[in-house]
Image (cartoon, rainbow, N blue to C red):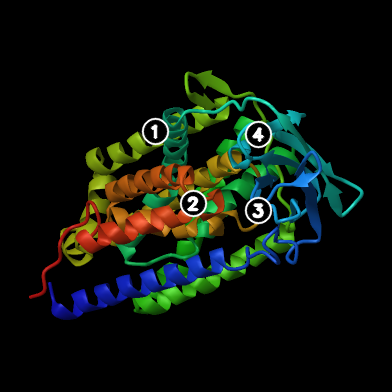
Amino acid sequence: MEVTGLTDRRWMRALMLLLVGMIAALTFVGGGAAHADEINTDKYDFSFSGFVRNDGDPLKGVLITVSGNGYSAQVKTDADGKWKIGVPEKGTYNITLDESTLPTGIIVAEGGNSVDVEIDKVNNKVYNFFLGQGVRETTSFLDQFIQRAFTGLSFGLLLALAAIGLSLIFGTTGLSNFAHAEMVTFGALATLTLAVDLAWPLWIALVGALLLSGMFGWGLDAAIWKPLRRKGVGLIPMMIVSIGLSLALRYIYQYIYGGSTRQLPGADGVDLKFGAISLSPLDLLSMAISIVVLIAVAFFLLRTRIGKATRAVSDNPSLAAASGIDVDRVIRIVWVIGGALAGLSGILFAFYRPGVSWDMGFQILLLIFAAVTLGGLGTAFGALVGSLVVGFFIEISTLWIPSDMKYVGALAILILVLLVRPQGILGRKERIG
């Protein structure tokens, strides 16, 4: 391999990681609190608030979580027992008080520590927990670990669908496609349009959304990326184009669908208990679908002629073309597959959150790139392994750190692995000369 080619590839990797870091900074900035007892109150017009007191005495440092409609935030009470959390829209949210942060012997005496509260006619809804003496029911660390592990597996599998699509595109074209997040969002929005706005039966809407997602991937390649390749545009300019495309598509989605979070039909369900594991039927179905699709992708890459041609193009496009492989045809097929996988990931993520929003793909773009980089750039199986590692550590880390900082654990693992193995878990070493 030529020194120049490898140098360009290393510059591409360094620039991609720099941009991922910038996205991480943008992701974590903006969720800051106005005060120690408030969060997002200066960002949103609606909020929940309350006091935590025991026999009139305020309790400081009690953790309150508000979640729902694809949104989640946490805050701790101040010295007066006060807390306030801003929310992006009106609706029903779940408010949870973490009893482990209460003094010993104090529990939530009435109503339970987790309640659903609705903001309807007012901008601020006040809810107070009633405390009293009692014996606190606790969940063992082992049970929490098992539950988090299965939740991480479920999230890692749906993340793998998007990561494999991105990895296939990078492997065959060398493009770091930052608009892949909007391909994820497209699948969820297409399902919302067909199943809710057009009132199609859910299963028909899901099939239709996957077909549209594949067509969307083909259309992006035909309209943008193929003409750029023919003109010999470099990979770094093409990556910058993908960032601009990502921004354009994201705000087109917001203009068409608005800024609110909407639910897909069937998102609600009763959890099933399997010992220490609590999963909804949708979680089980999502894991089953992800596993079946990933097996199908593996079979495609290892056993079919197109799959073998895809691997050949990924290894060496020039040699593949000299061997009689239609490189442009392979790339078109990869874009269709990548679009369909991203769309399916978006659909499953909409049920996992739950909810569909205009920027939902961007919310996990950092994790998708982390999974691809961790597993090894351009390797589909590496993307799968990287996704499972990222999903696992994201959920397990919440046993020690606040849930709104759980992405930090995955990024820490990414950094540690790359320090030891720069090419990624399943990536190949590169030699200059």
Disc 3 marks a residue whose amino acid type is: Val
Q: Where residue 330 sits: x, y (%)?
A: 32, 55
The earlier-in-sequence mark between 2 and 3 is: 3
Q: Is residue 21 above or below residue 389?
A: below
Q: CA distance from mark 2 to mark 3?
A: 15 Å
Q: Quadrant of the C terminus?
A: bottom left
**Location of residue 304 by image quarter:** top left
- Assign a secondary structure to mark 4: loop
Disc 4 marks a residue whose amino acid type is: Ala
Q: Which residue is mark 4?
A: 267
Q: CA distance from mark 1 to mark 4?
A: 20 Å
The earlier-in-sequence mark between 4 and 3 is: 3
Q: Quadrant of the N terminus?
A: bottom left
Q: Where residue 385 sits: x, y (%)?
A: 31, 45
Q: Is residue 336 above or below residue 3?
A: above
Q: Which residue is mark 1?
A: 291
The answer to whether residue 4 is left or right of residue 195 is left
The answer to whether residue 422 is left or right of residue 90 is left
Q: Which residue is mark 3?
A: 75
Q: Residues within 10 Å of mark 3 (few under 14, many from 20)?
A: many
The answer to whether the residues at label 2 and label 4 have Cβ atoms under 8 Å apart is no
Query: In the drawing, what numbered circle is on residue 208?
Result: none
The answer to whether residue 272 is left or right of residue 322 is right
Q: In the depicted view, which residue is nearer to us: 194 or 58?
A: 58
Disc 1 marks a residue whose amino acid type is: Ile
The answer to whether the residues at label 1 and label 2 have Cβ atoms under 8 Å apart is no
Q: CA distance from mark 2 to mark 4?
A: 24 Å
The answer to whether the residues at label 1 and label 4 have Cβ atoms under 8 Å apart is no
Q: Which residue is mark 2?
A: 406
Between label 2 and label 4, give the one nearer the viewer.
2
The earlier-in-sequence mark between 1 and 4 is: 4
